Amino acid sequence: MSKTKWIAIVNKAAGGGKAERDWPEIEQYLHKYEIKFEPYFTSRRLHAAIIARNVIKEGYSRIIVVGGDGTMNEVINGLFSQGHIQTAEVMLGMISVGTGNDWARMFNIPRGYDEAVRTIKEQRTFIQDAGLVQYHKNGKVWNRYFINIAGMGFGARVVERSNRMKDKGKSSSLLYFYNMFASLLGYKAQEADIEIDGKSFNRNIFAVNVGICKYNGGGMIQVPHAVADDGLYSITLIKKIGKLNLLANMKRLYNGKIVNHSRVETYMGQSIQIAGSRKLEIETDGETLGQGPASFKIIPKSVQVISGEMSA
């Protein structure tokens, strides 16, 4: 395996084109810290996955992701689609240029480019879990890997609206917040059958978050009990809840106390199945996928990432 050069996968569209505008500056910092690298630029959806898979097959084992959570998700799917080496043997660094940057927040990766590149140079590594979700789209069954959070129900609806706006060139840290309010108007909870590690139950649900890490939606803490390397999913289930009740508790979504609400249940598990009375929408790591029924499997300690300085 190549031990001397990094591959930088740059999503030029990340952050509403911010990655493309800022790449010359990022490149200067990579040179400043004497990081030898070869850049690859994405040109379409899932291109980062193809690049990652191909460069690993060519013998590279160190990848810098320049983009947002969605770009990292694509790279993860490229990582798992190759059979050349064990996934945890590939080292992944991140320079955040997205709108949410929730996965980077979990690992305290600096937002400043100088600090982010220095963090990559220092190479503090962490081996985290990954998830695999099976879902439905256009009458077919699909698989997707993820390393942060998968959402079903209301959260997935908000992500879908936000991504449509991003595709039109709109980008803002308040994008998710705006679409959350807009999506409330016509959204209704629905009945779902849920199974966690063989235990089955039925709930009328508003939203479900299946988490490896803690943050989503641009800083929300909906799965505060998540531990990234414990081999378990952390699940937060919000049952049917009134719109005014949800709005009154908005602060709890950001400080992690939403799990103490009377309409919220939390679980831990390795294997999860969720099937709604109607087709529940689903997203992973901020990427719109399709609909349920969905099944989740955990892949313990399978991804090696570079983290910032973590608090004790």
Image (cartoon, rainbow, N blue to C red):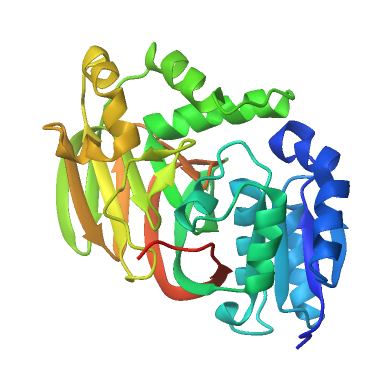
Q: Residue furthest bottom?
A: 1
Across and down, in percent, residue 153 comes to 37, 33
Where is 143 relative to 177, above or below?
below
Where is 69 relative to 248, above or below?
below
Is residue 41 visible in the rendered structure shown here? Answer: no
Left or right side of 67 for 8: right
Across and down, in percent, residue 130 comes to 46, 65
Across and down, in percent, residue 2 comes to 79, 85
Identify the residue at image location x=15%, y=33%. Answer: 261
Identify the residue at image location x=71%, y=60%. Answer: 117
Is residue 223 visible in the rendered structure shown here? Answer: yes
Where is 308 relative to 16, above or below?
below
Q: How many tags in the picture? A: 0
Q: Quadrant of the C terminus?
A: bottom left
Left or right side of 41 for 235: left
Q: Residue furthest left?
A: 262
Across and down, in percent, residue 268 comes to 23, 59
Left or right side of 245 for 10: right
Q: Quadrant of the N terminus?
A: bottom right
Image quarter of residue 180? top left
Left or right side of 282 for 266: left
Nearer the observer, 108 or 233: 108
Image quarter of residue 93? bottom right
Where is 65 relative to 19, above or below?
below
Nearer the observer, 26 or 159: 26
Nearer the observer, 216 or 25: 25
Nearer the observer, 50 or 138: 50
